[in-house]
Image: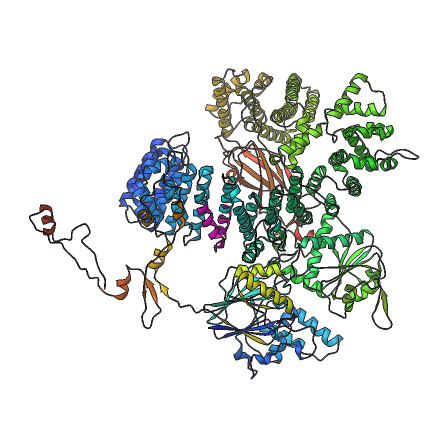
Amino acid sequence: MERLLLERLELHLDPLSDERRRLRALASARALIANPDSSDSTCSSAVDTLIRSLDAHPGDPAFLRPALKLLGEAAVLHRPVAPSVIAAVRPFLKGGKCLAADAVAVLASIAESSPEGGGEGGVSLLASVLDEHLLLSLASSPISLVRSRILDLLVSSIGRAQSSVSLLRPHLMLKILLGLAVDLYPLVRRAALDGIMAFCEVAGSDIDSSIIDCCYDCAVELFRDEDELVRSAAVRLVSKCGQMFAASKERTANTERMDVIFVQLCSMARDMSMKVRIEAFLALGKVQLVAENVLLQSLSKKVLGIRSGSKTITKCSVNESKFSLSAAGAFVHGIEDEFYEVRTIACKSLGMLATFSIQFADNALNLLMDMLNDDAEAVRLQTLQTLFHMATHDRLMVQEKHMDMFLGLLADISALIRRAARKVLQLMMLPDIKTFKFTIDCLITNLETYPEEEEDIFFVLCFIGKNHGNFFAKLAKEFTQEIVPSYGELSLDSPRVAAIVVLFISSCISNEHLTCNIPVAIFSYAVSLAGRISCPLGNATNRHSLMAYLCHHSEIPFSDAALKSEMAEEMCHSWPLRNVISQVKVKENMLSMNEMATHLEHSQTDVEQTDEELMQSIQSILEKVVETWPLIKSHCSHEARRTLRTCKEELEMIAWNVTGSLSALLEFALQYVQIIQLIAEMWEKLQPKMSHIVGMITLEVLLEKLNMALRRMRYGFPGLSREVECHIIELTLLGFVFRLCKVGACSNFMLKKLQAIISRAEFLCVEGSSKLSEFAKELLRSCAKGGTGETSQPFPVYKLLELFNLEQVPFAGRFRCIKAELQVLGNDSENPLPVVSGLPVGITFQITVHNISNSDRLWLRMAVGVSVQYVFLDLCQFTGRDEVRSFAVNTPFYATPKVPSFLLRACILMECPSENVTDQKKDQRGPKNDIFLLCEEIDVYLVKIDYR
Amino acid sequence: MAIECLVLGAGQEVGKSCVVVSIGGKRIMFDCGMHMGYLDHRRYPDFSLISETGDFNSALTCIIITHFHLDHVGALPYFTEVRGYQGPIFMTYPTKAMAPLMLEDYRKVMVERRGEEEQFSHDHIVDCMKKVTTLDLKQTVQVDKDLQIRAYYAGHVLGAAMIYAKVGDTAMVYTGDYNMTPDRHLGAAQIDRLQLDLLITESTYATTIRDSKYAREREFLKAVHKCISGGGKVLIPTFALGRAQELCILLDDYWERMNLKIPIYFSAGLTIQANKYYKMLIGWTSQKIKDTYAIRNTFDFKHVCPFDRSLINASGPCVLFATPGMISGGFSLEVFKQWAPSEKNLVTLPGYCVAGTIGHKLMSGKPTRIDIDKDTHIDVRCQIHQLSFSPHTDAKGIMDLVEFLSPKHVILVHGEKPKMATLKGRIQSELGIQCNDPANNETVLIPTTQNVKINATKMFMRSCSHADFHSVKNSLPCLSDSSFGDSEASNLVRNEKVVEGILVMEKTKTAKIVCEDEFLQTLHVEEHKVQFEYSCPAEKCREQVSCQSNSGPPPSDGNFSETC
């Protein structure tokens, strides 16, 4: 096939053939080159043919342009041909308008690609061909496209050049970049600015300060550019220069300059373009070493007096006031910007700058507290994060006037906001006793409104109690009266009482001297609440010591007296929360708020040890599963299924508190149990004494389920050992036998599939140590017999079934688990999405995938009734290459039915990578191979727009 | 060529905005408003100053209305229907939609309530609106051969625009009223960087610098929340358009977030009608409303319930929006009478109230008793909260805009005289821009620079458009990498581009600048070459003999051409 195509290619590229043919030839050349299965020799000869054809059609841009582009792609895909491509392309650099640009684009793409598995880098390849003279003449080309592409080439060479190789000497490089930064075309200007940025980044700290000056001047001039993208690039560059000034040795000499940079950035924060404003606020957050008065000016729209330190009289006053004027109120404008993106970033930058000055932090707090009333949730959340950031840097000095607004957020409708507000509250130092009381009251109201958030609220109460022992001591009596009933029974169910008890205990643990003032009764109440409060008190595993502590104080006899006092002692001295907090403060820049909770969990449990234990318990459960086999075989399925059910439940139980590496194993085990359950069920259905017709339909369903689950086992756990794979294949074979049972004979297609699987099993056994089981061997034999001829000869199904025997799954090594989570935020039966029936509806899915590589083919399936729509999820588009990737996909669903409301079922599917035998009948738009589910199907509720 | 600017209204005062600008033979009237404070001839601009004969059609090229407030559009039906102007009128889509509502409302109040003589009839309004041409944002309209106009977003109210006008090389911007900070339903004013000779800007808050709007919102919400959680009723008297919508969005959003269930009412009439327009004109609102529009139209207020008169005395807390804003009569007065005696209730007042209205009385001190006429009086025990939302930009915003546009000249209108003088001083001293604050009926003459247009050939443009790095390289031959980084580096940025060309001026054509290479071609002359040859004694060097014998010029430097 390849040969044929190649010959045809040569024929069609003949100079005498007509234009259409030549273009078609290019298409087949592209196919040859792009196909990963093409051999190297084919590729190189295809490229050679192309190169020859370039000479044959000198004055034909209609052919030359696509040919050049194709050559560029070939050089990227097949590195060995790159030198010859470069050589072929070089003459075109001096060619006409478009050709020169295309030729440069080819070179740029080569420079950008990095060779696989070592070898010469693209840049060094080019360096041997391109001399400075040529580059300079290209950079001064009258064609803007050439200039912009040569910039691409230079920028990628800056980024990738190994220390030894570079296309241009640095001063020439900078010369070109600076020269092109004032180009007539905005596209070129922007690329040049990005180039300067890359240049500065690569050069790092050893760059000369006068060069930074040049770059800085150049960028500042472009602040008044007409094009918004140029302005944003200029802002980025100024920010970068600012960082470099701050990092340079003469940093003290630069303070004046830093002020100027800050003011300049402030003036850009008033730009008319949203993109520029975003960049400006990002940049403001990164500025360092700015004088406090300049910082303060950015928080006030009114011009604040003359700058201290500068001895100004009349001469400078105009400049001074102009200086202050441009900085004035930049942040005030930022936080009331029309676009929430700008507000969010302004808020974040405020937090960053607040670490430099106490006065600034105080003034900023006034603004931040107002922002808690913003209409965008993202902004409110960012504000709370900023407050948290400030709190961890000891810059959060709240005043009474702030608390009203802040505590209002505890009643916010968004759970995310409520949680974030509480996190800030944990670290907040309350100004006076009145606020303290008010805060406690608010938290208790909060607890009454949202009982489901009890744990979190108790957690905050703990911190507040601990941090404000002195306030609490003053109020202790009042609180005591409130909860100790003068008559009747104490209701511990009341959230108010529970909250106050938590407050008591927490402040006692941290302030030992308080203990004596507190009635013994309270400790005894706490004992009965121990289960609920132990977790918030910061210690799940250490529950016993809490118990001991409480019992000790409440004078209830405790089972282990010796242990009791010891533990209580320990508890007071090393309260784990204390440690956590200090750790959080140290690592603040790495930790976000959410991580704090996980951090706690980690410090609580001894991870290693539990892992080992869990592993063992999973193994023993799986053993139990295998033990059910004889039962199944002897048709005591009832009992077998009961055992399996318990096994599953146990596994689910374990799954509650497993995170990290073990979750894959657990997932696997769960799947395995489910498969055995299915097999058991089918086995029962297949009892020869029963009529076949009875179970027909359900059997079909069961079979499909089984196959799906088996595919998931086989392809959803990368890193499985051969033995396990063998085991799964055997189960798959069993599935086939079941199917044969049902039909009695098998189609050609199924036979092919069966053969493919058996050969895989054989291959695995040849490679590995294990042997084919009797069952598989027999199947192989019958397959060989029946496979050659017609399907007339029935398989010895029951014999095969008799032969099958379930063995223990041999686990070895670590493997990962591919899975996905699918969600449509804010959609439930109460809040359906509006739809205009007959028109497509856009649905935003939040997708989280685990352990997926870019080569995996994922699909999103949406089904309403019988109409099914598949959407391919191109993973390359979603950022991050980590184990867990989260992204949002907004996708239209086309076939909206004409009904008042309906349910859409969505799930994520994965295509099995290697099954070559495909069923052609499948819907062409959907996945072509077999598929399996990566998550449970979810329901999306939709309603016609008038019916809401 | 000079710009002549005749201020017919809003000169050193607020009210009846009307400025007539003559540029390059074109006369444009910006806004045509009425003064709400006068009932005599001072109510309208003195149109006779435009044309003594009363032939406005030849005297004016067009009228442009910036937004629908009466002090900007109030005199338009009078001018077109009574005084007989028939020329083109431009306004934005929302302005065209809302202006008749405002005019009709005003006419009714004037004629039916106060029993005044009718200045213009309902038919006049309808006829007047038929003459209007609509503008879209950033749409350039060629009014006639020379005059171009373009509208930019101004904030302030729905559909408010700043107008850019250009005749030949002379360009100007008339801002109308604008707001540089966004509010809950409108975005901030937005304009491109333009080359301007003149900027006419409003200066309502010429000296005030406002704090963040969050503080104002917080105060308002706090007051309202406190009142309703105490079981009280909140009366919010507002003007029908703009402020009512903003406050309602604010409350609706707060209700949503705080999960409040207390009803909010709109008293019927203009507000509800206006709301319909707001729902349709989403394209003119703020980014947030545009973004969420597909999911839910912000003006479909979730917590607003239909109102019925019987609900005035229903028990339990509620919030009510009622017109008119200054409690000068109508429904808001009716409700005020009922609710004012209870200390649980709250009445909010707009930022500005005309003297004589109840709103003004409440603002000045806290009266306990208000006499409406000699028989009726109200005991006022309710709480009073004064709103300070304003859709005008503050002094900082004006300075920002002036600095951003950096025109050659600024004229201030629509403000109070002493404050305008202060602002004028600041613009002149801090920004170094010429500034005027003319009074009504004064004319300001502004000189403009005359530009001579020349054409340039394509080749010349190309030669300008790129830097030639070769020349640079040649000029710094000694700069090696080792020396790179010292003082030489500063030379790198001195990137003064010198472009050479030849200016060709012919009698009848526009002057043209051409490249040296094209010069001959332009003149249709042939190139003459003058060759110099060295003549050397033949016996000295054999090679040169061969060179000469070829009769070609020596390959080195003996050859140059000269053009004539």
Q: Is residue B348 left or right of residue A309?
A: right
- Relative to residue B339, is residue A501 depicted above or below? above
Residue A574 in sight? yes
Locate residue A173: give its quadrant.
top left
Judge by depth and name the residue closer to the eye, A769 or B269: B269
Q: Quadrant of the N terminus of chain A?
A: top left
Judge by depth and name the residue closer to the eye, A849 or A386: A386
Q: Is residue B283 left or right of residue B466?
A: right
Give how far across and how far down residue B299 sits, in percent. 67, 57
- Relative to residue A897, is residue A669 depicted above or below? above
Looking at the image, the residue that sits furthest to the right is A487
Looking at the image, the residue that sits furthest to the left is B539
B363 in magenta: no
Give how far across and how far down residue A690 sits, in percent. 66, 24
Residues shaded magenta: A213-236
Which secondary structure dominates the residues rendered in magenta?
Answer: helix
Residue A20 in sight? no
- Relative to residue B374, is residue B365 depicted above or below? above
